[in-house]
Amino acid sequence: MTTPPAERRPPASGPVLRRALLLGGIVSAALLVVAVIIGALVDGARGAGSGAIGVGMAFVFLGMTAASILVANRFAASDLYVPVFFASVFGAWLVKLIVFVVLALVLRGQPWINPIVLFLSLVAGVIASLVVDVVVALRVRVPYASDARLPQSGEGE
């Protein structure tokens, strides 16, 4: 039995994803400062730029997943919610994959990039984003069955 559109509520994941994006942005900004400073100490302007690019890539790529789910959640009241949700998430994943491969090929061998600083700042950004996601998920106060709808008395008889 499907729920009539008037009775559907937005998924409870919205506030959690917005919080993860906000905290991820704050942590990425702090990590950006650290990566630029360490990159500059290691290899001057070349290292600083590489550190900034690595952290920026990590934030954008990991933020795209949460953003795609938030966009898909806008269709929660529609009968097309499930296809839109999966198309949005899969589309974001596909875009991330293509853009990452293109960036890797474009940035490879550039004289203004320090590949070690770029790689280490990218890895640090990914780890920081994953830590933020875990912390947000552990602190969330959403019931396990937050989007479930219990049958009313007399329904289905």
Image: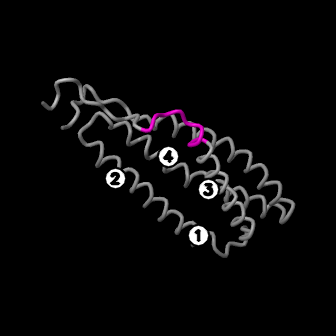
The crowd level at tag 4 (other Cα within 10 Å; few <14, some 14-19, many 20+) is: many
Which residue position is annotated with label 4?
66
In primary-sequence order, the first of circles 4 and 1 is 4
Percent position (x, y) of residue 49?
74, 59
In the picture, measured across the screen, residue 3 lies left or right of residue 135, that is left
Considering every residue shown, the one lying at the far top of the view is 153
- The quadrant of the image that shows the C terminus is top left
Identify which residue is drawn at 57% across, 72% down: 105
Q: Secondary structure at mark 3?
A: helix
Residue 63 or 42: which is nearer the viewer? 63
Q: Nearer the viewer, mark 3 or mark 4?
A: 4
| Three-letter code for the amino acid on which mark 4 is drawn | Ala
Verify CB contact (< 8 Å) between mark 2 and mark 4.
Answer: no
Which residue position is annotated with label 2?
87
Q: Which residues are magenta?
A: 136-144
Q: Nearer the viewer, mark 4 or mark 1?
A: 4
| Three-letter code for the amino acid on which mark 3 is drawn | Ala
Asked if the magenta segment contains residue 55, the reply would be: no
